[in-house]
Amino acid sequence: MAISYTVGEAKTQLSKLIREAEKGREVVLRRGRRPVARLVAITAAQETKRRPGRMKGRVQIAADFDEWPEDVARALGIVD
């Protein structure tokens, strides 16, 4: 269940709201009655989002990776 605060309330209670988010509660910030933002904890899954190059140097691709096995190449008409 989310808890809701106005932006003004959030300014004065930010540390408390961060603790609530760390406990797993969703904190909704609003201007008047209109929700404008959400304060949620960063989970381990969010911290490990996919990034290009993240596995650089950890993956080895065989030198013959893109070579067809001879029988398959022959069956596909790639070689005689």
Image (spheres, helix red, strand yellow):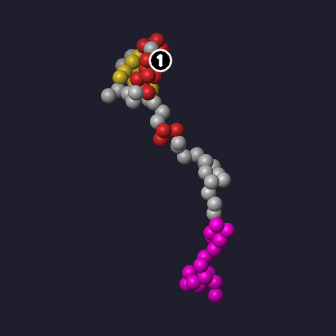
Assign a secondary structure to mark 1.
helix
- Can residue 26 be seen by looking at this rendering? no
At 62% from the left and 57% from the top, the residue drawn is 59
Along the viewing direction, whichever of 52 and 6 lies nearer the viewer:
52
- Can residue 23 be seen by looking at this rendering? yes
Quarter the C terminus occupies: bottom right
Image spot of residue 26 (x, y percent) = 39, 28
Image spot of residue 18 (x, y percent) = 46, 22
Range of magenta residues? 62-80
**Image height of 34 relative to 55, above or below:** above
Is residue 5 rendered to the left or right of residue 71? Answer: left
At 54% from the left and 46% from the top, the residue drawn is 50
Image spot of residue 53 (x, y percent) = 63, 49
Q: Amino acid at mark 1?
A: Ser
At 53% from the left and 43% from the top, the residue drawn is 49
Magenta-drawn stretch contains 43: no
Taken as a whole, is the magenta stretch helix, strand or loop? loop
Is residue 67 rendered to the left or right of residue 7? Answer: right
Is residue 26 rendered to the left or right of residue 61? Answer: left
Q: How many marks?
A: 1
The residue beneath circle 1 is 15
Quarter the N terminus occupies: top left
Along the viewing direction, whichever of 2 and 57 lies nearer the viewer:
57
Magenta-drawn stretch contains 74: yes
Image spot of residue 41 (x, y percent) = 45, 30
Seen as rendered, the residue at the extreme bottom is: 80
At 61% from the left and 51% from the top, the residue drawn is 55
